[in-house]
Amino acid sequence: MYEHKTQPLLPRKQFLQRVLRHAAVALALLMLSLLLGMAGYAYFENLPWRDAFLNSAMLMGGMGPVDAPHTNGGKLFAGLYALYAGLFFLISAGIVLTPIVHRMMHRFHWEEDQ
């Protein structure tokens, strides 16, 4: 998927395309995660879609829910979704930063462990 250290650096245009592809994957995962959160809040807390979106987006952004859950299922879902949102942040940062870090390593000839 990435060029080997013995190969030349990818041209800038192709590198930017690679970064955009990685960002698109992260954005698609974000949309899927928001839909999952919205569905969970709508199912467990009977929230309207706008309120479910707000709560999901706030958790994904690290701010916490706007409406405190009232049902046991809603509380369990909100806790698990908050843990997932924190993990998702790390994963999406890795997806977006991978091509940039790889290019830096390649450019400066840093050794990669194999």
Image: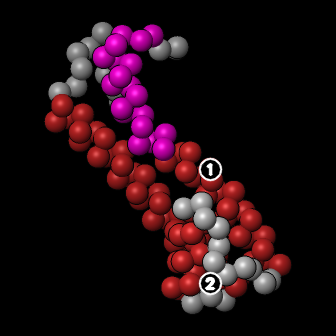
Question: Where residue 48 appears, x then y in whole percent?
Answer: 57, 90
Question: Does the rendering let one see residue 66?
Answer: yes
Vertically, is 38 above or below 11? below
Question: 99 left or right of 93?
Answer: left
Secondary structure category for the residue under label 2? helix
Q: Earlier in the sequence, mark 1 or mark 2?
A: 2
* Front position among marks 1 and 2: 1
The residue tagged 1 is 87
Secondary structure category for the residue under label 1? helix
**Which amino acid does the dot numbered 2 rest on?**
Ala
Principal SS element in the magenta part? helix
Question: Where residue 47 appears, x then y in whole percent?
Answer: 62, 88
Q: What crowding class fits label 2: few (fewer than 14 Cα within 10 Å), some (14-19), or many (20 or more)?
A: some
Inter-mark Cα distance, 1 to 2: 22 Å
Residue at 24 percent across and 34 percent down: it is: 15
Residue 51 within the segment the image draws in magenta: no
Question: Where residue 76 appears, x then y in whole percent?
Answer: 78, 70
**Which amino acid does the dot numbered 1 rest on?**
Leu
| Viewer-proximal residue among 59 and 95 | 59
| Viewer-proximal residue among 104 and 5 | 104
Q: What crowding class fits label 1: few (fewer than 14 Cα within 10 Å), some (14-19), or many (20 or more)?
A: few
The residue tagged 2 is 42
